[in-house]
Image (cartoon, grey):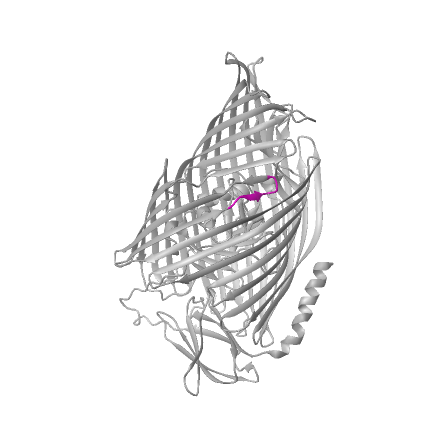
Amino acid sequence: MKNFILFILLSFFALPLLAQQSGRLDGQVTDKANQPLEAATISIHRAADKKLVKITTSDKTGKFELENLADGDYSVTVSAVGFKASNNKVTVTGGKSSLPSLAIAMEADDKEMKGVTVTAKKPMVEVKADKTVVNVDAYISNAGASALEVLEKSPGVSVDRDGNISLKGKQGVIIMVDGKQTYLSGQDLANLLRNTPSNQLESVEIMTQPSAKYDAAGNSGIINIRTKKNKQTGFNGTLNLSYIQAKYPKSPNSININYRKNKVNLFAAVNYSYWEGFNDIKINRKFGVKGTEELAAVFDQSTYGHFKNKNLSSKVGMDYSIDKNTTIGFQVNGTYNPRNWNSSGTANIYDGQGQLDSSNVAFSINDDIWKNYGANINFRKLLDTTGREITADIDYLGYESNSKQSSFNYTYYHPGNTLEDSFLLKGHLPSEIRIISAKVDYSQRLGKQGRLEAGLKSSLVKTDNDAKFTNWDAGAKDWVIDSGRSNHFLYDENINAAYVNYSTQWKKWSLQTGLRLEHTHAKGRQLANNESFTRDYVQLFPTAFASYKLNDKNTFNLSYGRRIERPSYQDMNPFQYFLDQYTYRQGNPYLLPQLSQNIELSHNFKGSLNTSINYTVTTDVINDILKQIDSLKVTYQTKENLSKRRNIGLSISYNKPLTKWWSVSLFGNIFNNKFEGEVDGTTLDANMTAFMVNMNNQFKLPKGWGAEMSGFYRSKMQDGGLIISEPMYVVNFGFSKQVMKSKGTIKLNISDPFYIQQFRGYTKFGAIDTQIRSKWDNRRLGLSFTYRFGKTQNNGPAPRRRTGSAQDEQNRVGGGNQQ
């Protein structure tokens, strides 16, 4: 009810201001085939003296806006590389424009760009009203990196030791690719991002307060990864080759091709990467005598892990313009990822007096073939010249994993180092996920300054996880079913959503309000014990955004949103994943969704200095929990709901060229997290203040050379309430050179040369006293080569972004832990 009242108050706040409208002009720039043109220049001059009044550029969809036009006559000129200029006249009277919306179809001018190659340098970071955009190619140190490492260097983003991603100190971020959910979460999402080379990425869009048009999922917001799409006509493409040498070799490679002519655009991409590395973990655990302060046992455990990945992925698709107002497209994609993880470890077990009692030697092997395939059909129709538009998407996605685990444990007792016990376990854990999702969106102008958006979405998810464990029976000399660990878990989920979003502008103000309704019906069943649950609930998610432009130098923004974070499918899977006999991870099928309310106030100064304050309260927090079985000396990690988390933070970013040859991007965030709840009957009331800093310096050197120095520092912070991570930091260097008449680029990346990026953390809560240290194959020397072939002038339209109907489910799948 409080949310609904706030939504109504913000809406009524706008009403008295609607009458204060001023002149505003917006529109869309396309080519003759009605494909949108990105980066077209729109300039408006006074008709009387030809003086320039406003200038802007079109976005990726070809759209643009010009605001705060005084009464008078104007001429509007639209220009784009490779096209003939377009001129239009407009009159503003009484704050109203004679042409509130322009639909401009540009005519190609092949003679204009004959023999000319145009290259442009994007800034590292762009701070916009509704999002922060990180341009991936602007970072030299991204050469040869993975998508996960690109995110780790992005402002406000942090990645923990398991690959979980948080934003401004808040967990629960949703990752999208080209507007579509990956339908993955946790370690499977991390594995996908680790196998996605950075040379396939164009930008990273960080949205802390998405509008009602987006799925309500994501406690801390949405990160949308934009992949590269070719914008040229004719046949062209990009070849990327990389080799990385660390302790083990790595090599991400890809080729993109595109053919665009008249009404047809064909595109395809193939990625192949080989990724080999290690992840070493040291764990020290202390077990006390229950009810006393005496020490019962100490585990000093070291595990050395080695992995190999071969990842082959591809996509192919087509866009076809049926007529100037109608476009239809399709895309199919697939991934084949065989991966192997093996580890060896020793746990020395001491008694309460510090005497060595026994040693456990463990060998674990995990062979898995992970497959993903998907198809998308999309449709776009312009209904008239006023900007009315309808779009639709249908998606089908499938994920398959065929994991085979082996964990062999041998216990040697001291003195004498005699083998007294063994624990041999094998597991076959096939997993399937099927997702069908469809959505339709409609938008139109409402009045002179307003825009109305509305849409519907429905998704159906089915998961099937069958775990079959066997133990070695020494007496029978055979493998027997382990009924205590074997299970078969089925989960079905249907989410239906509807939203409405309204935005308007007047003088120095702009306002956006929205409301999203989501109905969730879910059913889970464990066949081993015949336990089941059903959940059926409806939630409302209001959003509100207000912006005030004080002058050309200062803009203020205030936003509010209510969001939901549903548990990932993997986190609900009750199966166990072993590190050794005494350490494993286990899902929790009874997790509840967490709900959050977010308020953010920000100020932008001269487009380069941005300051924001955020406040978030989350209930039923989905949290990593460590649990112990004292009698077996076992510690395992699982997920549970805590009652509440409060986050308050202040962030500052600065992005600007300091000289003609030096550009800098800085980000700092200080925040406080407070957790409240109960874990295993013990009250949790913990809070900690932490901060993080990101830095990137780009240097433009003579003769096509470039250099970079970048890094980040994260202070001691609280990960999920129970785990305290020690400070983490890294420094990277990079060099680049334009070759082959700027058609080729060579980049050299030196990642973590001082080998200082490691994870160190601990948990001291209740009976749990654990210290963890982890390091991985992070010190690397990478060399990459990019070659752009085919037609080089940028005289074609920006391709359509296939947003898809997947706005929530794809971020929730799960599996594989590698670095």
Q: Give yes or no for residue 334 being in the magenta stretch.
A: no
| 409 relative position to 783: left or right | right
Q: Quadrant of residue 250?
A: top left
Find out whether residue 719 is within the magenta segment: yes
On screen, residue 674 above or below 415? below
Q: Is residue 145 visible?
A: no
Quarter of the view holding residue 719: top right
Task: Report x, y in % for residue 765.
Answer: 63, 35
Q: How many marks?
A: 0
- For residue 35, above or below residue 813: below
Residue at the extreme bottom of the image, as rendered: 48
Relative to 312, residue 111 above or below:
below
* Quadrant in the picture for the C terminus: top left
Q: Toward the viewer: 96 or 755?
A: 755
Please name the predominant secondary structure of the magenta segment in the image: loop
Q: Is residue 25 visible?
A: yes
Residue 292, image x and y in percent? 68, 26
First to last magenta residue range: 715-722
Q: Residue at x 61, y 28 (%)?
A: 486
Q: Residue furthest right?
A: 1
- Residue 579 left/right relative to 736: right
Depicted 428 relative to depicted 702: above or below: above
Front-lying residue, 818 or 616: 616
In which quadrant is the N terminus drawn?
bottom right
Residue at 58 percent of width and 77 percent of height = 448
**As rendered, which of 129 and 761 lies closer to the eye?**
761
Q: Identify the image quadrant of residue 475.
A: top right
